[in-house]
Image: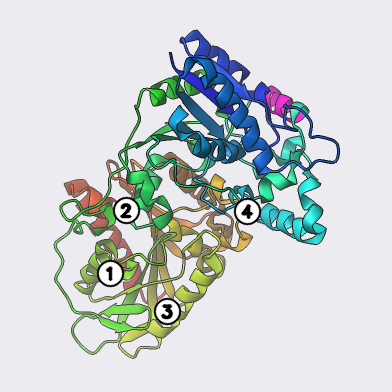
Amino acid sequence: MTVFILVAGAFTGPHVWRDTAARLAAKGAEVHTAALTGLGGPPAAPGGAIDLETHIADVLSVIDQVTAHSGKEVVLVGHDYGIHPALGAADRRARSIARIVHLDAGMPQDGVPALAAVPDRRLREQLSERAAQAGPGAAAGEVPPPAKEEWPLWGSTAGLLDAALDGLTALAAPQPLGTLLQPLRLTGALTAVPVTGVLCTGSGASIEMLQIRVDVGDPALQALADPRVTLFELPTGHWPMLSGPAELADVLIEAAAGGGHRLTAADADHPPAHLRPFLLDVPDLPRERTGNTDLYLPEGPGPHPAAVFVHGGPVPIGARPTPRDWPTLTGYARYVVGHGVVGVTLDHRLHDVTDYERAAEDVAAAVERVRADPRVDADRVALWFFSGGGPLTADWLAAPPAWLRCLAANYPILSPLPNWGPLDARFHPVRAVARAGRLPIVLVRAGREMAEIAATVEEFLTEAERRGADVEVIDVPDGRHGFETLDATDDARAAVRRAVDAVVARLSLSSI
């Protein structure tokens, strides 16, 4: 018999597990819920503060009760904030834990408080400022429970019926501030305990996106490629125990049995997807490197039109090679040289979703440096964006300069993903396209795109049509995100040629 201990997240308590627990029990599992002090559990002692250690002790009590007589190993499930006390307790009872399940929760590290995992950046800053102003006594304070319309600040409400959201609001309790501020302490005892992550795609997360981040070398996620780590997806928002209890129960049973998807680690024989060869044969042309920018030049003095290829991200600071040397970017840059166009690749500082302003500065500076080169026709430039570089298109859509003859984007993110928190309104292409005017836009759409990204593309196209924007869509029906190094099919090759031809045609026009 599988034994589950379920730990709820911020503002919530054992009541959120009711339907999921019933379904687990119906499948023959033994189910316990951890009642955390102040969150459905006992109140704190008079004058006592509630912090993370208080909640760790609550979870430890349940583990000890479950294992005291039977000696059974448990599957410990932590949702949202609940993963922090779950991990803290498991670290002290590692021999009793068969598996830890992160249910739409992060990967807390030793010494890091739960506040760092709050998805809304502005909310994190407000709580940090409040704690700093309150001083040492801040641990005794509370964070008021969200109003109904405020729950999205704490996680996606996708899939929640209105009645469920009403119930979540009615039963919510204040979150003791100390539970968010006190750093988690881990000894390393959990390194041998198997782990499962359950990703709720309505929150903007997916297995495919995690694999991409592992591939590009995100150091915080390398542990996910361990064979003891399995992953599942649920097509719902941040509260699957309310929006899909039956589906969640099925996943938890399968996770307990060791099922799930495993990420792959790159090695010499299996390079990561973004470093595999470009799908077209392109000449091995030399580059000219200046600062963060590389130029691939056609023959002849010019001046030649230019296409500037802007990578996506976020990309870890230490990623090597850097994006301007990735095969997709160098492949396009070398290919357009054969069309008489200067191919330009560059590196920018998009290392986190909070870095779009810095990345935009880098791109703008690189473009001006390229336009100042006497071998470049400064009045005929195209900008071509990829993936997470999509939000950077907004500046150019909102105020297209006369020299920008075309804006292209491959499998772009065109509005903030749900787990990004609030993004500066400046970097919202769906809103910016209203001011694109006559600027030609070439959008390359991957047919097998991740659902959360595909939704932003469709939102953009709907708004572009409503605003009368000049958009040409080139579809790659069987293409995946990053198809240029993943899907070397005839259809994919034809799509690349069509996209380049479309951009070059705009660069060839005397005016737009």
The image shows residue 296, relative to residue 206, as above or below, that is: below
The image shows residue 134, relative to residue 237, as above or below, that is: below
Tell me the chief SS of the magenta region: helix
Say how many tags the image has: 4
Q: Position of residue 273 (x, y in %)?
A: 26, 52
- Image disc number at residue 325: 1
Mark 3 and mark 4: span between their CA atoms?
27 Å
> Sequence-wise, which precedes: disc 3 or disc 1?
1
Mark 2 and mark 3: span between their CA atoms?
27 Å
> Sequence-wise, which precedes: disc 3 or disc 4?
3
Q: Position of residue 63 (x, y in %)?
A: 55, 26
Q: Provide the residue designation for mark 2.
A: 215
Residue type of the residue flagged with mark 2? Asp
> SS at mark 2?
helix
> SS at mark 3?
helix
Visible in this render: residue 20? no
